Image (tube, helix red, strand yellow):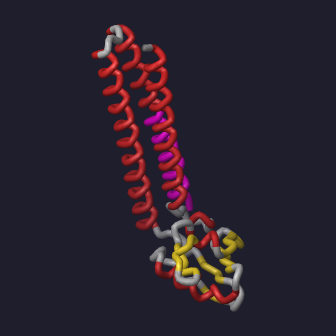
């Protein structure tokens, strides 16, 4: 029985870690006024008839805090890359110099910063919901073990431990969110 409880703990830890990783990835997509190659992460380019991630057809760098440089590996792909960035609807207007694209990241207005904080908070809430769902699944498994003969004191200990895992994950979400909010609001 204790092996089953330990397995449930491991599954809960793994699920919560995946939820936190996903949350961190989503936070990276929210720009904080500084140019970053991550801003173009979701951009797809029509590569000879096949939708392909931008990172697989071009080199993406930051020239300075406000400029992203995108250099396609094939010069013939320049227009397709530009079209992909525009179609991604990120609010960027790439400028072509014949060999690469330069994207100026405009400074954020106060209203836009507040909107980005709201988006980050919504992502944080989604992460917390995922963590709570993981807790519910683990609690259901513990209850099933109780019906199979798990002693009540072991059940209570397991439920307490599961709640501690959940609380710890929620604190991590809050910490990441506070860090991102500070980053967004810093001018």
* 186 w.r.t. 108: above or below: above
Side of 59 relative to 172 (left or right): right
Task: Check if residue 13 falls in the magenta segment.
Answer: no
Q: Main secondary structure of the magenta part?
A: helix
Locate the C terminus and report the quarter of the image it occupies.
bottom right
Q: Residue at x 37, y 53 (%)?
A: 122
* 168 w.r.t. 153: above or below: below
8 or 107: nearer the viewer:
8
Say how many tags the image has. 0
Q: Which residues are magenta?
A: 169-187
Q: Residue at x 71, y 87 (%)?
A: 99
33 or 144: nearer the viewer:
144
Locate the N terminus and report the quarter of the image it occupies.
top left
Side of 166 relative to 29 (left or right): left
185 or 132: nearer the viewer:
132
Q: Residue at x 53, y 85 (%)?
A: 83
Question: How far across and how far down the image is residue 81, in percent?
Answer: 58, 82
Question: How far across and how far down the image is residue 154, in percent?
Answer: 39, 11
Q: Residue at x 48, y 21 (%)?
A: 6
Q: Quadrant of residue 127?
A: top left
* 62 w.r.t. 3: above or below: below
Question: How far across and how far down the image is residue 170, in percent?
Answer: 43, 36
């Amino acid at each position: 029985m204790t092996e089953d409880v330990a397995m449930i703990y491991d599954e809960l830890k793994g699920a919560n870690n995946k939820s936190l990783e996903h949350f961190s990835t989503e936070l990276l997509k929210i720009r904080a006024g500084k140019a970053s190659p991550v801003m173009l992460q979701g951009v797809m380019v029509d590569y000879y008839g096949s939708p392909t991630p931008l990172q697989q057809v071009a080199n993406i760098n930051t020239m300075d805090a406000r400029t992203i440089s995108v250099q396609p590996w094939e010069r013939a792909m320049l227009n397709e890359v530009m079209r992909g960035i525009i179609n991604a609807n990120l609010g960027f207007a790439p400028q072509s110099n014949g060999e690469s694209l330069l994207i100026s990241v405009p400074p954020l207005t106060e209203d836009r910063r507040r909107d980005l904080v709201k988006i980050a908070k919504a992502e944080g809430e989604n992460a917390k919901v995922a963590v709570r769902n993981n807790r519910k699944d683990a609690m259901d498994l513990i209850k099933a073990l109780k019906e199979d003969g798990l002693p009540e004191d072991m059940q209570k200990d397991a439920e307490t431990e599961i709640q501690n895992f959940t609380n710890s994950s929620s604190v991590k979400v809050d910490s990441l969110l506070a860090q991102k909010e500070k980053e967004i609001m810093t001018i």
